Each structure stands twice: as structure tokens, then as C-alpha cells.
């Protein structure tokens, strides 16, 4: 064992780490650990560096080695739990975080991460309590303010969520997603959410999206679209070219299986797009924004455009309608769902961060863009906190 050599290598690692050369830092920390296996700081910093460069299996081993040297090292317990959370190893994350809160109950980050773990398990009220626990220990903890605001928003308590989202926005004033969340609970109505907000939301949902949406929320719009469109699509002259806006994991393509020659999808979430491609039903799935996707299509190049539970994340539909009218071939169809669908005009932003669209608004836009409503039905879109969410399903025909 060479303590002096280990200290020299550790200092080299720290210098590299501070300058952003994380791989070089990890190598120096590893050599320091080899020189002195009991060097706690080297073990811990090695784990941090390995996790930062994506070598998570090695990082896990390094955190455990640090904890073998000092079982109450709360930073190692907290970071190890974050690693577990990143890989959805929730039971292990909970165990590490409970240990962290016990060995250092005044340290705020484990309480916040305990809330994150509970959120991933769908235990929103328990998560809210843990975010509040984190803030009780550190009232200036911006991430805990953001998480508590989101939890309260999910629980349908926008007035309570607002001051926490305001605090988070004060810490990150240039973050468009936090600004949108704040606007939603404050009653503002921006015309659309930022792309970053939608992509992040659905990337997080992607791994268990189908199970969550179909089994827990009773989502049925893709199947209803297939029921409403089936006869028309079967009778449509070939080729039948379909565009799937906000395609998600590909539920619409699955529902329309066998009724098209070509379907192309687009989704803002890379995680969702990847799962749609895995169905092997699409000619192509792009990762991008739906209006840009439509703008890149040729005139009269699609027979059917579908947007299932997508316009709840768009707001102002005028440009989408204009592009859809241009892209639809003669007699083609635009089929989509909206939440709300009541008799008023306009659209509004719910505190949940989802838009509702009135029937009068949809009808006015359709008339303005030479689209004729050929079918409209009241639907239950999904469930929200156990309650049915009302909406409408529309089918519009292009008038060329």
C-alpha cells in the first residue's frame, strides 16, 4: 500500500474531473484505489465518474466498495439510489434511500429522491410527503420545489403547486418546461407547450406506456378510430397512405393493421419513436415535431392523417389544420381526438398541462381550411385519478 502514491493519483483525478476530463479522472481514481484500497474519497469519486460516463455497472460496484469502507456514507447511499432509479430498480432504490434518511435524517437529497422513487411507483401522495420532507430540511432546495409542484399538479391541487413552481422557475428562469408548468397551474394559456416538455414527459412514460395507458387509464381511442374509419379505409382505392401524428408506441398502426399500404409516424419522444419502430408496421418513424413533419410532406400525398390523443399537447390547431388540408389527397380523411369537446369556442389549458378544445373551435377551424366534418362522437378519452375524461372524436374530409 502506498498512501502517498494514492494521494497523488487522487489529486490527479480531481484535477481532471474539475476540467471535465471525466474518463481520465476515473482512470486516475482507479489507480489511486489500487494503490490504497482503503482510500474512501477515491472510491466515492471513482463511482461518481463512472456513473457520469455511463459505466453504471462499474459505478455500482464502486459505490458498494465505498459503503463497505463507510456504511453510513450518505452521499454514496443517495447516489447509488439514483443509479438504481435510472434503471428502474425501484426496490433497491427504496432500500438505499431509507438507509440514507436513517443515517443522516437532516440531509435533504435522499428525501427528495425517495419522492422520485415513489412517483415511479405511482404513489403520488406518498411522494408529495417526501418532497415536503426534503424542503423542511432545505427550504431553498430548487429540485424539491419543482418535484413538489409537479406532484401537487398531478394530485389536482394547482393553487398549492403554484408557489413551488414559481420557486423552481426563479432558480431556472430559462427552462421552458418549468415555465409551461407554472403557466398551466396559474391559468395562463400559451398556444402550445415547449417541445422539451412533451419529449421529456413521454420519454419517461415510454417503458411502460402501453400498460399504463391501456390497463390503468382505460385508453381506447386507437380502437375507436379503427372502428370509425374501418369501412371507409377498406373501401378506399389503393395505395392507402397514412400519417400518424404523435404516434407514441404505435397503437394506431396496430389498430389499423392490414388496412394500409404505408404508414409513417412522427413523435417528439425518442423513446416512443423507438418503440413504434419496434412494431415493424411503419415505413418510417421520425423523431420530431408534428407540424414540421406535416410541412415536409408533399401536396395531396396522404389518404389518412390520424392524431390520437395528441392535440391535448398542441393547443392552437390552426396551423395543423392548414397543413393537413394541404397534405390530404382528394377525399382523404383527418381523424383525431380532443379532450373537452363542449359547446363553447376556443381552447384552454387545464392545470394538468393538457389542452381542451371546444366543439365550436374545431368546427370553425374545419370550415376555415376547407375540411368537412363527416363524423363526430362524444367519447371517454381515458381516466384521470379514477374519473372519466370526456372528449370528442372527429373525422374530417378534405375538400379539394
Image (spheres, rainbow, N blue to C red):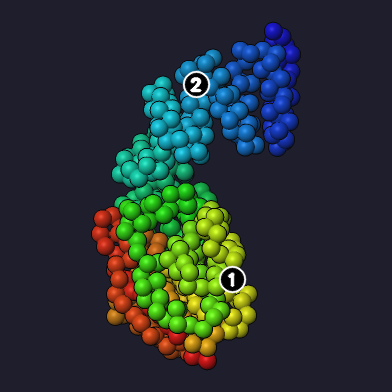
Residue 387: % across, % down? 25, 59
Q: Nearer the viewer, residue 347 or 225?
A: 225
Which of the 4 image quarters holds residue 89?
A: top left
Residue hosting label 1: 293
Q: Is residue 305 left or right of residue 130?
A: right
The residue wearing badge 2 is 73
Helix, strand or loop at disc 1?
helix
Secondary structure at numbered mark 2 = loop
Which residue is farthest bottom? 400
Find residue 52 and report its horizontal and vertical position in percent: 62, 36
- Marks 1/2 in contact by CB < 8 Å: the verdict is no
Asked whether residue 349 appears in the rendered view, the answer is no
Residue 234, position as x, y percentages in the image: 44, 78
* Nearer the observer, 282 or 182: 282
Label 1: few (<14), some (14–19) or many (≥20) C-alpha neighbours in 10 Å: some
Discs 1/2, front: 1
Amino acid at each position: 500500500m502506498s498512501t502517498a502514491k494514492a494521494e497523488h493519483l487522487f489529486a490527479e483525478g480531481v484535477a481532471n474531473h474539475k476540467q471535465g476530463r471525466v474518463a481520465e479522472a476515473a482512470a486516475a481514481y482507479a489507480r489511486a484505489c489500487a494503490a490504497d484500497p482503503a482510500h474512501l474519497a477515491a472510491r466515492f469519486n471513482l463511482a461518481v465518474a463512472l456513473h457520469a460516463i455511463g459505466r453504471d455497472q462499474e459505478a455500482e460496484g464502486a459505490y458498494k466498495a465505498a459503503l463497505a469502507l463507510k456504511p453510513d456514507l450518505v452521499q454514496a447511499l443517495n447516489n447509488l439510489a439514483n443509479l438504481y432509479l435510472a434503471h428502474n430498480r425501484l426496490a433497491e432504490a427504496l432500500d438505499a434511500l431509507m438507509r440514507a434518511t436513517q443515517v443522516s435524517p437532516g440531509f435533504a437529497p435522499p428525501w427528495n429522491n425517495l419522492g422520485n422513487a415513489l412517483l415511479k411507483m405511482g404513489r403520488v401522495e406518498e411522494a408529495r410527503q417526501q418532497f415536503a420532507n426534503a424542503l423542511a430540511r432545505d427550504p431553498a432546495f430548487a429540485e424539491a420545489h419543482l418535484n413538489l409542484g409537479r406532484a401537487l399538479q398531478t394530485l389536482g391541487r394547482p393553487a398549492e403547486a403554484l408557489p413551488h413552481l414559481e420557486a423552481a422557475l426563479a432558480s431556472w428562469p430559462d427552462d421552458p418546461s418549468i415555465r409551461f408548468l407554472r403557466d398551466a397551474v396559474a391559468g395562463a394559456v400559451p398556444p402550445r407547450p415547449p417541445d422539451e416538455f412533451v419529449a421529456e414527459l413521454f420519454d419517461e412514460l415510454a417503458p411502460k406506456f402501453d400498460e399504463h395507458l391501456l390497463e390503468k387509464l382505460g385508453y381506447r381511442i386507437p380502437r375507436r378510430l379503427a372502428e370509425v374509419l374501418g369501412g371507409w379505409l377498406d373501401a378506399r382505392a389503393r395505395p392507402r397512405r397514412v400519417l400518424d401524428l404523435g404516434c407514441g408506441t404505435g397503437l394506431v398502426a396496430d389498430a389499423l393493421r392490414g388496412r394500409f399500404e404505408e404508414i409513417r409516424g412522427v413523435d417528439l419522444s425518442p423513446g416512443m419513436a423507438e418503440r413504434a419502430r419496434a412494431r415493424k408496421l411503419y415505413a418510417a418513424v421520425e423523431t420530431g415535431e408534428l407540424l414540421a413533419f406535416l410541412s415536409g410532406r408533399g401536396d395531396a400525398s396522404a389518404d389518412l392523417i390520424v392524431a390520437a390523443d395528441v392535440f391535448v399537447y398542441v393547443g392552437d390547431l390552426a396551423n395543423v389544420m392548414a397543413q393537413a388540408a394541404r397534405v390530404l389527397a382528394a377525399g382523404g380523411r383527418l381523424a383525431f381526438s380532443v379532450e373537452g369537446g363542449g359547446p363553447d369556442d376556443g381552447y384552454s389549458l387545464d392545470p394538468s398541462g393538457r389542452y381542451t378544445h371546444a366543439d365550436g373551435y374545431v368546427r370553425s377551424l374545419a370550415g376555415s381550411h376547407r375540411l368537412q366534418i363527416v363524423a363526430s362522437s362524444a367519447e371517454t378519452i381515458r381516466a384521470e385519478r379514477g374519473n372519466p375524461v370526456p372528449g370528442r372524436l372527429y373525422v374530417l374530409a378534405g375538400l379539394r
